[in-house]
Image (spheres, rainbow, N blue to C red):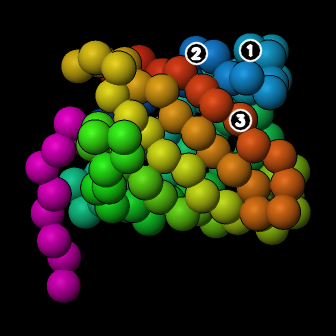
């Protein structure tokens, strides 16, 4: 069954800042991004890390956010983890991505036009 969501996180978000990696790394292969589709699935890539995500709407500290789990690869090694996006404005989010048993980073992204 395919449920179609309608929320402000749907779309492609271009990552412009990460707390753990610099722009030379996170934009190494392509413009770093997170994409959320209307079925709450999506994809992302930064640096040599890419994957698919499965998300849902959640609430934290009285604010709506899009929480997700992900699986993919980091330099061809299998990787997985979790994360979230929270609106800062209509066209900007802050987020968090974590590797299972590994690194994590906050990030900022703007909505692609």
Q: Quadrant of the N terminus?
A: bottom left
Q: Is residue 112 above or below residue 106?
A: above
Q: Secondary structure at mark 3?
A: strand
Q: Earlier in the sequence, mark 1 or mark 3?
A: 1
Q: CA distance from mark 2 to mark 3?
A: 13 Å
- Give the residues drawn in magenta, as a range: 1-10
Magenta part, dominant SS = loop
**Residue at numbered disc 1:** 23
**Residue at numbered disc 2:** 16
**Residue at numbered disc 3:** 105
Q: Secondary structure at mark 1?
A: helix
Query: In percent of the image, x 60 and y 27: which residue is there?
Result: 107
x and y, in percent, of residue 11 in the image: 30, 37
Query: In percent of the image, x 84 and y 63: which residue is there?
Result: 101
- Judge whether residue 5 is colored magenta: yes
- 95 or 75, nearer to the observer: 95
Q: Are marks 2 and 3 in contact (CB under 8 Å)?
A: no
Q: Secondary structure at mark 2?
A: strand
Q: Earlier in the sequence, mark 2 or mark 3?
A: 2
């Amino acid at each position: 069954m395919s449920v179609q969501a309608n929320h402000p996180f749907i779309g492609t978000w271009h990552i412009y800042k990460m707390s753990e990696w610099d722009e030379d790394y996170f934009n190494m292969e392509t413009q770093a991004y997170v994409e959320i589709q209307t079925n709450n699935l999506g994809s992302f890539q930064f640096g040599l890390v890419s994957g698919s995500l499965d998300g849902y709407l959640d609430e934290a500290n009285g604010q709506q956010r899009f929480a997700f789990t992900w699986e993919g690869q980091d330099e061809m090694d299998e990787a997985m983890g979790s994360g979230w996006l929270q609106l800062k404005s209509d066209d900007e989010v802050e987020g968090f991505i974590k590797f299972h048993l590994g690194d994590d980073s906050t990030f900022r992204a703007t909505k692609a036009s």
